[in-house]
Image: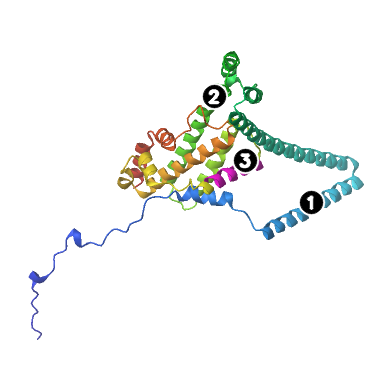
Amino acid sequence: MAKPVLIDLDDTPTLTPSDAPPVPDLGLPDGRAVKAAAALAVARPSPITRFAVWALGALFSLMISVAVYDFVAGLLARNTWLGWLAFGLTGLAVVALVALAIREGLGFYRLGRLDGLRAEVAVARKAGDLKTAGKATDHLLGLYKSRPDLRWGAANLAERRAEVLDADALLNLTEAELLAPLDLAARAEIEAAARRVATVTALVPLALADVAVALFANLSMIRKIAVIYGGRSGTLGSFKLLRRVFSHLLATGALALGDDLIGSVAGGGVLSKLSRRFGEGVVNGALTARVGVAAMELCRPMAFNALPRPKVSNLMSRALAGVFDGVSSAMTKRG
């Protein structure tokens, strides 16, 4: 019969919270969704890929054209009425394609017009010539003459410009009277886009959903900002403008969100008190606001001089007002 074994419990080590392994440092949120959207927007295919796409597109267009021709010719041979109906529908399709091409061309023209006005204003400000500044002001008035929301500013500018005898003063007056209402509208679009991106990133756990939302929200925001300043663009023009904005931000390193901005946007140590997902939403919203400010600078017909350049921290403070409590309660219910 086996002898009983005595276990001395006094020698068992006592575990304390200090003996637990350290929590892995996941680091601060870095705005992965917006940075991934920027990488997608500025990515350029290789020359071989572009040539392959062009060749396949040309081949596909030729195939469609031949198929439509054979279809219409066959119907004309079998039934005259059906053949002419098909011919008429083909003509309408061609007209629609031409209209789309014209719309895209006008979109590129409007964006180029804004670039030209911005360059003209810069030259006039640098030269300090009142006559040159007056021409730039007239061109800006011509751009916005049909805007009902700028009638009061245009009338005030026309009334006061005769009293101004300095080029810088005239350009500053023009900026204050014509662009101040447009800047407010652009700010509202930036705040709405930043709020949307921050909320979706915080609440949607899917890996690629936040990237898709960030890309769509930024594209929509940039397009609306261009419309506000008179640069309504088509589909191709919007993607070109998106590429320009992201290329500018990546070239200047503006998508590298610093700890100081995180603290000012998120309220100091709030990121350490909330979930990492929520912090990621705040950072993605801040990066979206930076994209919006860059879009304002590229779409504005005048550089910021008389009016202050919007600050990301101020935009995020207004964009996320009331969102903290709403998102936190939603996350609590979901948990």
Q: Tag on residue 46?
A: none
- The residues bearing labels 3 and 2 have C-alpha atoms spaced at a distance of 29 Å
Q: Tag on residue 64?
A: 1
Q: Residues within 10 Å of mark 1 (few under 14, many from 20)?
A: few
Determine the residue positioned at 36% across, 54% down: 27
**Above or below, 276 relative to 193:** below
Q: Tag on residue 238?
A: 3
Residue 31: percent from left, percent from top: 44, 48
Position of residue 292 in the picture relative to residue 276 (left or right): right
Q: Residues within 10 Å of mark 2 (few under 14, many from 20)?
A: some
Where residue 100 sits, quadrant-wise, is top right
Q: Which residue is mark 2?
A: 172
Q: Amino acid at mark 3?
A: Ser
Residue 46: percent from left, percent from top: 65, 58
Residue 327: percent from left, percent from top: 37, 40
**Above or below, 41 relative to 96:** below
- The residues bearing labels 2 and 1 have C-alpha atoms spaced at a distance of 55 Å
The answer to whether the residues at label 3 and label 2 have Cβ atoms under 8 Å apart is no
Magenta-drawn segment: 236-249
Position of residue 194 in the picture relative to residue 99 (left or right): left
Determine the residue positioned at 13% across, 68% down: 13
Give the structural element (helix, strand or loop) at label 1: helix
